[in-house]
Amino acid sequence: RLSTCRREVRRKSWTCASPKHATMSRAFGRCAVVRAARFGVSPMRSAVEVIRHAPLPVERKCEAAATRNMGSGVTEVFSGKGFGELLAMRNSKAKDGRKRLVKGTVSPPLSVPGHIERPPYVLKGDGKTPWTDAYQIQDEEGIARMREAGKLAAEVRDYAGSLVKPGVTTDYIDKQVHQMIIDHNAYPSPLGYGGFPKSVCTSVNECICHGIPDSRKLEDGDIVNIDVTVFLNGFHGDTSKTFLCGNVSEDAKKLVEVTKDSLDAAIAICGPGVQLKRIGEEIQKVADAYGYGVVRSFVGHGVGRLFHSGPTVLHYRNNERGKLEVGQTFTIEPMLTAGGIREKYWDDNWTAVTADGSLSAQFEHTLLITDSGVDSLTVQAMKV
């Protein structure tokens, strides 16, 4: 029976699908074969049962492998009634049972009064800013202005966080953030940067970063990172914090807490002459202690007159060269996940979410290296 079932799964999996999705996962096929032989049902029906019930770890692995290998074409392999709907239902939920994040409606960009100073990429109208590997080293005047920009960014971030409640849309938060920034004669740095359409980034649940505010209402149990950057008197202040919405699970709270701890640990070792790679080492050490992943695709960066510049600050163990210098301003902004660290993008080419749907949290500060150590320019009363 086992041999017969194996042949049937192999034959149907190679002939029923389009070339793009021609091959059934070997693990998934073996799982269906075993169930078919054990319970005396057809392998195709057994394959559907693997998805439907999946009570055992091996079957969950088979489900994940099949979805990964066949993607949206999985329904071409099986013609079992209800299979497509069943898989869609499975894919709409993350591993912890949460509903996956879905895109809402994005409203038009907000206007900025003409008297407010714009960053160069807005003035040019192309949203592009040249990258330089050079550190942004501030003189006395630059340090004073960076402190002002950092202070405002922190105040805006914390105000935005006070708006995080079930039923509130991220679009509403964007509007309030925008108004507060322009009321202080500053420009919301994300607006128009590389075509970004909003004044703040709001990244909910499995969104790693660069979430675009929209009409989706925040739900009880969500976590949401709010990333604020302001351009004030010719300098950028950049910061983010992950906020809790309503009654959040203990697992989510722990992820948020540990992410902040990883940032604090990295900041604690900063000072003149410290090797850049030590930042990643400290973050990785904290994440590893709790079994969390550290996202590798997004980095910290220099900040000042330019929104982004060198150094590239990696948040994981690395052999990056370079040392911190007195007067240098830059960000550290680790993103930790409760599962995999691989990202995928929505079709807006900005929103990056975890590929496996696991929760992600982030914290960020703008930092200044001083003669005696480091100052956080965006700390305020930043409590989890």
Image (spheres, helix red, strand yellow):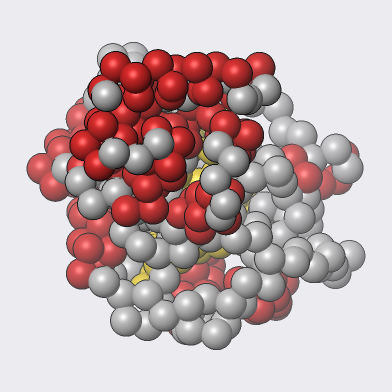
Of residue 63 and residue 382, the one placed in the foreground of this image is 63
User: What residue is rendered at 70% in x and 43% in y?
Assistant: 347
When the figure is inspected, residue 368 is found, relative to residue 248, above or below; the finding is above
Residue 112 lies in what quarter of the image? bottom right
Tell me if I can see residue 250 in this picture: yes
Q: Quadrant of the N terminus?
A: top left
Kindly give the residue lying farthest to the left in the view shown. Answer: 289
Say left or right for 81 vs 291: right
Tell me if I can see residue 264 in this picture: no
Of residue 53 and residue 349, the one placed in the foreground of this image is 53
Query: Residue 377 in the image: x percent, y percent?
Result: 40, 56
Say left or right for 220 vs 323: right
Q: Quadrant of the C terminus?
A: bottom left
Of residue 374 and residue 5, the one placed in the foreground of this image is 5
Query: Residue 72 in the image: x percent, y percent?
Result: 61, 38
Query: Residue 351 in the image: x percent, y percent?
Result: 60, 48
Say left or right for 125 vs 284: right
When the figure is inspected, residue 54 is found, relative to residue 154, above or below; the finding is above
User: What residue is rendered at 60% in x and 60% in y?
Assistant: 102
